[in-house]
Structures are given as C-alpha cells and as structure tokens.
Image (tube, grey):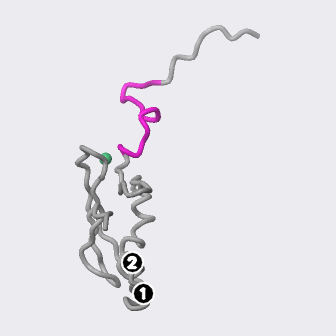
Amino acid sequence: MRGMSLTTDGRAPGPVRFFLACDRRDCQERITFDLVIADPPPDLEEDLFGHMLHEAGQATPYIKELGWIFIEGGEGYWCPACATPPSLRRPPDAQDPEEEAGHEP
Ligand SMILES: [Zn+2]
C-alpha cells in the first residue's frame, strides 16, 4: 500500500503523532505534528479501511491548513513549496511595479 509519506504513532482516541514527508522527487521536506483525536476508529471487523485510515483521515483538514496537498493517483503528499506552481511563486525581490506616470484625463 502506498501513502507511506504519512505515518502515525499512537492510536485514537488520544494524542497521535504524525510524520509527514514530501513525496515529490528530490524533496526532503518533512514535518511532525501532534493532534489529539477524540473519536475512536470504526470497528476493525466492520470497516477495515476506515479503521486503518482513521487517524490519517482526522488529520486531513489540518494537513490542508498547513499548505500540504494530497496528489491524486498515488503521488502522495507534497509540501507547500512543491504544491505551489512556479508561476505563482514570487521571487523574494519581486515588488509591485512603480505606478506608471501619465494618467491621461
Ligand atoms: Zn516538497
């Protein structure tokens, strides 16, 4: 099973530690964060997938908030830098162009 870029330590309900690594080639970005998950996972017998992915699913909104995105199709997670298209990245020295003179009435 893919998606090993997001791993967890601990099980709900309770504090869970998440380890998230960027899956983009050559990117070494990784973060760790803790969430307290109050809801227990669904029963293993009734919902195996839901049971296994419970903690990851609970963390999804938080991961989004951090700017990481999940790439559909098995690519995994990308960090905010990788998730931003080059065209939207502003070089640090980019400034608004001076307002051009010559406002014709
Ligand atoms: Zn990255």
Q: Look at the numbered discs 1 and 2 and tell me whether their residues touch, using CB distance below 8 Å.
A: yes
Q: Position of residue 40 (x, y in %)?
A: 39, 86
Q: Position of residue 46 (x, y in %)?
A: 43, 90
Dot 2 crowding, Cα within 10 Å, few <14, some 14–19, many 20+: some
Residue 103 as seen in the image, left or right of residue 1: right
| Residue 72, numbered circle | none
Q: Position of residue 74 (x, y in %)?
A: 38, 58
Check if residue 69 falls in the magenta segment.
no
**Whole-Å distance between the Cαs marked 1 and 2?**
8 Å
Q: Position of residue 104 (x, y in %)?
A: 73, 9
Q: Is mark 2 within 8 Å of ligand 1?
A: no
Query: What residue span does the magenta drawing correspond to?
Result: 81-95
Dot 1 crowding, Cα within 10 Å, few <14, some 14–19, many 20+: some
Residue corresponding to mark 2: 54
- Residue at the image position 34 percent from the left and 82 percent from the top: 12
Residue corresponding to mark 1: 42
- Residue at the image position 39 percent from the left and 77 percent from the top: 54
Label the magenta part by its dominant secondary structure.
Answer: loop
Q: How many marks?
A: 2
Does label 1 or label 2 sit earlier along the sequence? 1
Quarter of the image with the N terminus in it:
bottom left
